[in-house]
Image (tube, rainbow, N blue to C red):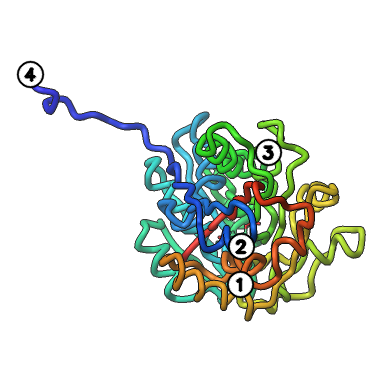
């Protein structure tokens, strides 16, 4: 018998370990050691494969016969379908009318059971999701950002970075914030590695700055609408937990313009030869335009900074 006689079933996680690469251009620019965590290489094209993937994985561990319901502007739905398919279950995605045909086609092509368009924004699409869920006893609700399993899944970014830095915890992590699921994952991961005193830069775009506005007001603020082109950051209210976490002095909130985020995408493509979306460009705009030292003045030449290159769809 050869080793090829028996099919080998490899249990597949819905996410992969992504490379962490040092950028000499960005290190020179920022005056410290800048690394890129390439989560645009996840199966779904964004870090959402981790959090959403973990939520779905956990919900199937108790009962494999489930149908997943995801409400999303795009990336979370794509991650939910991609995870569901790799774990052998089915998934319905509700998106608002604002979601592009391009994205809907991607979600369908990934193997969605159905893609339902409902309402002008995520809030309406989400209420539709919950309605469908109520009618299906096998249904599992998959939030794009607001669940402990999502934060736990996203926290694996930090585990990998620490491992890839030879056991060192990054001094600064930069991430874009929509509803705050990525941010909460980083905070949780840093805490687990004894790095609760390390800095997180939480970046939003003007017109989607629900976290910055909440911090300014000292209470959870709901934006009247989203006017930023960075639709992946378009949560009118961040998770309550994200607001709590962001009040710590180790967290720095930064807001960049849509234009700066878009220019960052172009420059990143030029210099690093990778395509990212505007939501991700926002994090890079802090380095390219705001200046990291203006946000984190205590930065030293040997500080290790990780930018989460969160997605490219
Ligand atoms: C979802 C998403 C974000 C924001 O993540 P939250 O967990 O909602 O804060 C940022 N960038 C990309 C590419 C995303 O898909």
Quarter of the image for residue 32 reads bottom right
The mark nearer the N terminus, 3 or 2, is 2
Question: Label 3 belongs to which residue?
Answer: 190
Quarter of the image for residue 12 reads top left
Q: Specify the farthest residue to the left.
A: 1
The mark nearer the N terminus, 3 or 1, is 3
Is 167 situated left or right of 113 in this image?
A: right
Q: Given this view, does label 3 or label 2 mark the residue nearer the observer?
A: 3
Q: Residue 22: x, y in percent?
A: 50, 52
Q: Nearer the viewer, residue 308 or 90?
A: 308
Label 3 to label 1: alpha-carbon separation: 26 Å
Q: Residue 5: x, y in percent?
A: 11, 26
Question: Label 2 belongs to which residue?
Answer: 128
Secondary structure under the numbered disc 2 in the rendered image: helix
Question: Label 1 belongs to which residue?
Answer: 230
Could you classify mark 3 by the number of other residues whose Cα lies within 10 Å: few (under 14), some (14-19), or many (20 or more)?
many
Is 246 situated left or right of 150 in this image?
A: right
Residue 124 can be seen, yes or no? no
């Amino acid at each position: 018998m050869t080793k090829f006689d028996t099919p080998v079933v490899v249990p597949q996680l819905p996410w992969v370990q992504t490379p962490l690469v040092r950028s000499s251009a960005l290190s020179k620019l920022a005056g410290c050691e800048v690394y890129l965590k390439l989560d645009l290489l996840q199966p779904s094209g964004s870090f959402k494969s981790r959090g959403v993937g973990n939520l779905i994985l956990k919900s199937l561990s108790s009962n494999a016969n489930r149908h997943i319901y995801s409400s999303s502007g795009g990336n979370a739905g794509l991650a939910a379908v991609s995870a569901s398919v790799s774990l052998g279950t089915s998934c319905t995605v509700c998106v608002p009318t604002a979601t592009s045909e391009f994205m809907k086609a991607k979600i369908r092509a990934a193997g969605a059971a159905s893609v339902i368009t409902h309402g002008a924004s995520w809030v309406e699409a989400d209420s539709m999701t919950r309605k469908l869920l109520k009618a299906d006893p096998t249904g599992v609700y998959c939030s794009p950002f607001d669940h402990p399993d999502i934060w736990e899944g996203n926290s694996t970014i930090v585990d990998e970075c620490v491992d890839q830095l030879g056991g060192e915890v990054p001094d600064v992590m930069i991430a874009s914030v929509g509803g705050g699921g990525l941010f909460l994952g980083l905070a949780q991961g840093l805490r687990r590695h004894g790095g609760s005193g390390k800095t997180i830069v939480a970046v939003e775009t003007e017109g989607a700055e629900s976290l910055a506005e909440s911090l300014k007001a000292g209470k959870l603020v709901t934006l009247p609408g989203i006017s930023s082109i960075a639709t992946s950051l378009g949560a009118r209210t961040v998770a309550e937990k994200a607001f709590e976490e962001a009040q710590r002095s180790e967290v720095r909130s930064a807001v960049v313009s849509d234009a700066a985020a878009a220019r960052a995408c172009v420059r990143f493509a030029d210099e690093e030869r990778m395509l990212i979306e505007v939501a991700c460009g926002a994090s890079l705009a802090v380095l390219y335009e705001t200046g990291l030292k203006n946000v984190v003045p205590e930065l030293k030449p040997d500080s290790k900074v990780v930018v989460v290159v969160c997605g490219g769809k």
